Amino acid sequence: MNENEMKLIIELVPSTSWYDNLRNCVSRQDWDKIRKKAYADTNHRCEICGEKTQLHCHEKWNYNDEKRLQKLDGFEAICVNCHMIKHAGFSMHTEEGRRKFNRDELINHFCKVNNCSRNDFLKHEEEAFEIWRERSQYQWEVDLGEYKEVVKSVQKR
């Protein structure tokens, strides 16, 4: 099974870009507006698995590997399990993440959402970490896209 056939994929942010995100650049009030709009846009359901449960607002990034440009493409309202798969590096591979999340439960969620096998997950995980290791060797220019103005207005306060 290839990534294009999957509804849920692992999206690892290069280590050189950790914490370079919109959430860390705007006020709590502005972030709340963004995330609540994302939740309302999906009728408070996970955009990936459809669960109606506690949601997280996930920043969607597009990477141009040639230019080393990381661009914010928008947001997804997703459940905790889908979000922890997206950030498998944290949830499955750090001591703090392993204390909070059960790897087998997350793998089972991934397999259920994608209708795939555990081996499909393990192959996808390996490929995602291979991309992460390569991207983490470089500094990335972060482009907040249409949200640049929100950051500018916060910085003026």
Image (cartoon, rainbow, N blue to C red):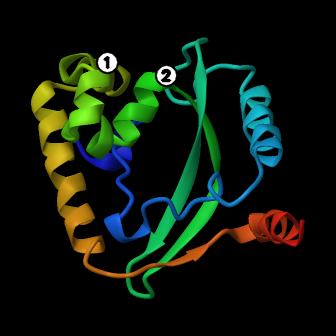
Disc 1 from disc 2: Cα separation: 9 Å
Q: Tell me the quadrant of the picture where the C terminus can be found.
A: bottom right
Amino acid residing under circle 1: Lys
Rendering quarter of residue 71? bottom right
What residue sits right under mark 2 in the picture? Answer: 49
Is label 2 in a helix, a strand or a loop? loop
Mark 1 in CB contact with mark 2 (< 8 angstroms): yes
What residue sits right under mark 1 in the picture? Answer: 112
- Mark on residue 72? none
Crowdedness near tag 1: few (<14), some (14–19) or many (≥20) residues, C-alpha within 10 Å: some
Amino acid residing under circle 2: Cys
Q: Image height check: is 146 above or below 111?
A: below
Is label 1 in a helix, a strand or a loop? helix
Would you say 22 lies left or right of 155 here? left
Q: Residue at x 33, y 64 (%)?
A: 15
Residue at far bottom of view: 67
Question: Can residue 84 be seen at all in this image of the molecule?
Answer: yes
| Observer-nearest of 94 and 44 | 94
| Observer-nearest of 55 and 47 | 55
Q: Residue at x 20, y 44 (%)?
A: 125
Question: Can residue 115 be seen at all in this image of the molecule?
Answer: no
Residue 152 place in picture, x, y as percent: 82, 72
Would you say 48 lies left or right of 86 here? right
Residue 33 place in picture, x, y as percent: 83, 40
Crowdedness near tag 2: few (<14), some (14–19) or many (≥20) residues, C-alpha within 10 Å: some
